[in-house]
Image (cartoon, rainbow, N blue to C red):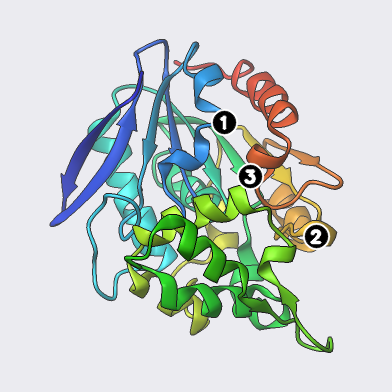
Amino acid sequence: MLSEQLFHHDRVSLNFASGPRSGPALVFFHGVTRRWQSFVPLIPTLSTRWHVQALDHRGHGLSSRVPAGYLVKDYVHDSVAFVQNQVQGPVALYGHSLGAMVAAGVAAELPQQVQGVVMEDPPFGTMGSHIGQSALLSYFAGVQPFAGSTLPVGALARQVAEIPLTTPGKAGSVRLGDTRDMASLRFTARCLKQLDRDVLAPIVAGRWLDGFDWAAVLSHVTCPALLLQADLSVGGMLTDDDAAEAERLMPDCSRVRLPKAGHLIHWLQTETCLRLVNSFLESLEMS
């Protein structure tokens, strides 16, 4: 059973869920706009062998709102403090999307404590200088007005479903509701209700990666790393070029491509994800 608590640092309060002390520490970092509950598909299985802790990033879920403090480097700063002060002993990290870049940042800054890192489809350049080249910009601009909404979840999900997604160079648009089922959109709506609208401002402005040189960060990740790459044709965000660069930069990187898996691998291919993650985690020397 998980219990929610608050971690305080630098005038920021971070909500996190903590499970039973079944083994070494395993800390989860979710993607932008989501919250710790994103990892519910994985936690029951992994908590039998690990002391699971899952964070709400600043501006998300039940964590503090921080005006003008929502760059990737800010999330890394919080997470380094969390691992340094809240986690005892060696730790493994699991991050999805934004959380994957955060996990890499923490591993780079705390090489003596972090023993392994799982990076699920980190967006890197896709959410940086290249964001205007895909439908992502229209997605984040489209959901921004709904952040912090007071609408009931069902009503909000129906409105979010009508967001038009446009891709530069392609005529017309695609309705968001035609790319996601209503159950997933309800979860998206629930997360948006607990999201600070300012979280999306630097993403839409193309400034999200300011101060975060992901290649330099990866060059300092010395622990074993599992890099899970989704399929670009169905919504994946990690390009082949960026994945190859990540492999080159990290000395002990195991890259796994997942054809036909979208960006949310742990939701869409949970059984496969658990098999890969369990295999990787059980290979670590947690000392």
Identified at 49% across, 85% down, the residue is 205
C-alpha gap between disc 1 and disc 2: 23 Å
Query: Where does the image place residue 78, in percent across and percent down from the top left?
Result: 30, 52
Amino acid residing under circle 3:
Glu
Amino acid residing under circle 2:
Leu
Q: Which residue is mark 3?
A: 120
Q: Between 244 and 178, which is closer to the camera in this rendering?
A: 178
Badge 1 crowding class, 10 Å Cα cut-off, few under 14, some 14 to 19, many 20 or more, is some
Q: Between 96 and 10, which is closer to the camera in this rendering?
A: 96
Q: Are marks 3 and 1 in contact (CB under 8 Å)?
A: no
C-alpha gap between disc 3 and disc 1: 14 Å
Q: Between 45 and 229, which is closer to the camera in this rendering?
A: 45
> Which SS class for mark 3?
strand
Q: Which residue is mark 1?
A: 41
Q: Against 24, is 96 above or below?
A: below
Q: Quadrant of residue 240?
A: bottom right
In this rendering, position of residue 9 left or right of residue 103? left
In this rendering, position of residue 115 left or right of residue 242? left
Tell me which numbered mark, 3 or 1, is placed earlier along the sequence.
1
Does residue 200 show up?
no
Does residue 58 show up?
yes
Amino acid residing under circle 1:
Pro
Q: Against 221, is 11 above or below?
A: below
Q: Are marks 3 and 2 in contact (CB under 8 Å)?
A: no
Quarter of the image with the C terminus is top left
Query: Where does the image place residue 73, in percent across and percent down from the top left?
Result: 40, 63
> Which SS class for mark 1?
loop
Q: Which residue is mark 2?
A: 232
Identified at 56% across, 39% down, the residue is 222
Tell me which numbered mark, 1 or 2, is placed earlier along the sequence.
1
